[in-house]
Amino acid sequence: MSAASAEEGADRGKDRPPGLHGSTGEQPSRRVLEEEIAILREENSKLKEKLRTAEARNLSVHANANSSRSGSFDAGVNRTSHDSEGPSFGILSRLEIPYDSLDIREQVGGGGFSVVYRALWMGTPVVVKKWFDPSMGEEAMQDFRAEMMTLSELRHPHIVLLLGACTRPPDLCLVLEYVPHTLHYILHKSNIVLDRKRIISLAIDLTKAMLYLHAQRPPLIHRDLKPANLLVDRQWRVKLCDFGLASTHPIKKGAGTPAYMARELLAGKPYNERVDVYSFGIVLWEMMAREVPFDGLDYADICKKVVEEKKRPPIPLSCSRAIANLIRDCWHDDPAERPTFNQIAVRLRELQYEGQSM
Ligand SMILES: Nc1ncnc2c1ncn2[C@@H]1O[C@H](COP(=O)(O)OP(=O)(O)OP(=O)(O)O)[C@@H](O)[C@H]1O
Ligand SMILES: [Mg+2]
């Protein structure tokens, strides 16, 4: 109990009629009982008031959490009394995982700012995405916070689940459910056969995740859809991961992966959520062709091809007309001409239905 609340308690005790705590053994008079009831009522209304204040604080914290998606995260604003012990992100205290409860095993991936490890968390297989140098500056810290905040708000069967986070420097990490494969591994590093039915089913899963992201208000743009960010579990369910570039704010800086980036992104022009539809088109092509798009070309080469020459990877002859048309529509040069994920879902369902009746 804090000093203030201890004093508050002592004050209340002074005015309190004897018998409220039931320690005198005497039978309380009607007047005493009425006074007790009045005091209880007063306490009750004080408690209600406290609850209202706490709820209001919670709401404003939530609003700040949303603003972090736009890159305007302010560490100070998100602090709660929980943070007084040290630097942390107290609003997510319910997600806090002690770093020493993680038994970190081998590395499974990694990018510019983080390394991804397989780990055990109290015996449960998980993945730990650890920011490897917390002293690298505010930009990287903001990236960590933004990804954590974004993931903490997403709940969908086709989006990787954030189990918790270690938010106390130097051990900044996200703890995620472990999903054994990536689509990149399946397509390019394994001999696993992917038939048309399987490809459509994977594409439908991804469409569901994207429908959910784009249904957020404002829409959440993933901006880095590619097979390495599509996890696949043992039941062949897709789980979208890597929300490092996800943003509701289209002008947020930072590129994705050139081969999957729409013309407007490559050219640094204004863009909207249809950039994800473009990437989806490339991913669908990649599943059909089982090749890496624009393999061996660097950023400048891809820009020249996609932006200036409006070139796209060659669609394999094995592709049915319906799938080829879907791919072409998705990677259309004009974002407004690209279908929405709703429309894509309908077309994929039709393909699935046709496949069943074949
Ligand atoms: N939940 C998970 N389960 C299994 N593997 C995962 C998981 N999350 C990430 N990985 C692996 O780690 C890799 C990198 O993860 P992620 O894309 O989130 O990190 P990143 O730092 O953004 O990397 P990159 O810059 O390569 O995209 C993934 O491509 C995948 O191979
Ligand atoms: Mg990634």
Image: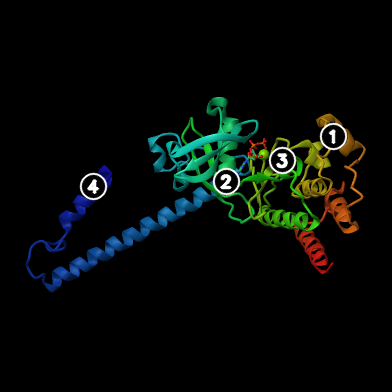
**Would you say the beta carbon of the disc 2 residue lies within 8 angstroms of ligand 1?**
yes
Relative to 318, 130 lies left or right: left
Q: Are marks 1 and 4 in contact (CB under 8 Å)?
A: no
Total marks drawn? 4
Residue at mark 1 = 302
Q: Name the residue rendered at 51%, 37% in the picture.
A: 75
Residue at mark 2 = 178
Circle nearer the N terminus (2, 4): 4
Q: Nearer the viewer, mark 2 or mark 3?
A: 2
Query: Which residue type carries mark 3?
Result: Ile
Circle nearer the N terminus (2, 1): 2
Query: Which residue type carries mark 1?
Result: Ile
Q: Nearer the viewer, mark 2 or mark 4?
A: 2
The residues tagged by marks 3 and 1 sit, at their Cα atoms, a distance apart of: 21 Å
Circle nearer the N terminus (2, 3): 2
Residue 74: name its quadrant: top right
Q: Nearer the viewer, mark 1 or mark 4?
A: 1
Q: Position of residue 164 (x, y in %)?
A: 50, 45
Residue at mark 4 = 6
Q: Name the residue rendered at 15%, 54% in the picture.
A: 14
- Image quarter of the C terminus: bottom right
Q: Position of residue 271 (x, y in %)?
A: 77, 45
Circle nearer the N terminus (4, 3): 4
